[in-house]
Image (tube, rainbow, N blue to C red):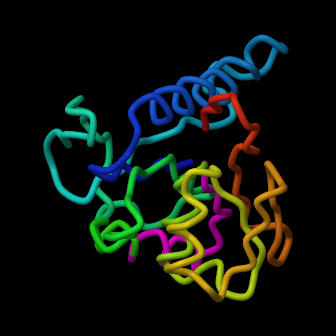
């Protein structure tokens, strides 16, 4: 299981997803009496060595380089923070190409909030349904007209074997929602 880290990522999503998946993958099997190795371990993947300064100014050190990861079962793309003007043009092309290669090799894809924009930028949602956080709806509609955006849905699964999933947040007037 791999989590690509873009400089535009929201650290709370990276850490929250990593911790949750680490617990599920490493601890759950042991709690049920399984093996000490666990079921899986999430790994943070970057495009180059060294720390990445995220959009909020927090630095994170990926565990693996995309060029060294030849296969993975799951790619979980965390939220990225982009604007309507720039769209996803600011995102690291090396990681987008890596996500595409991993999917071509059989990886399941998951995009959280703005992470679905990354999957769309990789061309992996064209002709499919997707959702995203409501704040990214204008960006999504402007830059990815080939994707059927389902903003009324919190989760959308599709593709062969449901190999593409996206999650967002439903907009409720007067309430702030997080990814």
> At 54% across and 26% down in the image, what residue appears?
16
User: Where is residue 149 drawn, in percent x and y?
Assistant: 73, 71
Examine the rendered structure and indicate whether residue 117 appears above or below residue 178. Answer: below
Q: Which region of the structure is painted magenta?
A: 97-112
User: Which residue is outermost to the left?
Assistant: 50
Total of numbered circles in the picture? 0
> At 66% across and 30% down in the image, what residue appears?
25
User: Where is residue 64 drawn, in percent x and y?
Assistant: 32, 48
> At 39% across and 69% down in the image, what residue appears?
87
User: Where is residue 131 drawn, in percent x and y?
Assistant: 71, 61
Q: Is residue 102 magenta?
A: yes
Q: Is 164 left, or right, of 37 in this rendering?
A: right
Q: Is residue 90 magenta?
A: no
Which quadrant holds residue 153?
Answer: bottom right
The quadrant of the rendering that contains the C terminus is top right
Which quadrant holds residue 41?
Answer: top right
> At 19% across and 40% down in the image, what residue appears?
53
Q: Is 129 left, or right, of 139 in this rendering?
A: right
Say which of 22 and 159 sits in front: 159
Q: Is 5 left, or right, of 33 in this rendering?
A: left
Examine the rendered structure and indicate whether residue 63 appears above or below residue 100. Answer: above
User: Where is residue 69 drawn, in percent x and y?
Assistant: 39, 61
Examine the rendered structure and indicate whether residue 29 appears above or below residue 59. Answer: above
Which quadrant holds residue 176?
Answer: top right
Say which of 165 and 105 sits in front: 165
Say which of 176 and 111 sits in front: 176
């Amino acid at each position: 299981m791999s989590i690509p880290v873009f400089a535009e990522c929201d650290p709370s999503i990276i850490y929250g997803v990593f911790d949750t998946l680490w617990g599920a993958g490493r601890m759950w099997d042991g709690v049920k009496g399984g093996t000490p190795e666990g079921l899986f371990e999430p790994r943070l993947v970057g495009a180059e060595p060294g720390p990445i300064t995220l959009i909020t100014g927090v630095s994170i050190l990926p565990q693996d380089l995309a060029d060294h990861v030849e296969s993975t079962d799951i790619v979980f793309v965390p939220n990225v923070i982009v604007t309507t003007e720039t769209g996803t043009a600011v995102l690291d092309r090396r990681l987008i190409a890596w996500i595409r290669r991993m999917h071509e090799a059989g990886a399941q894809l998951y995009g959280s909030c703005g992470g679905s924009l990354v999957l769309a930028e990789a061309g992996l949602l064209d002709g499919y349904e997707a959702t995203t956080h409501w704040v990214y709806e204008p960006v999504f509609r402007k830059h990815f007209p080939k994707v059927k955006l389902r903003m009324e849905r919190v989760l959308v699964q599709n593709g062969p074997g449901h190999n593409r999933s996206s999650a967002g947040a439903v907009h409720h007037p007067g309430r702030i929602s997080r990814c």
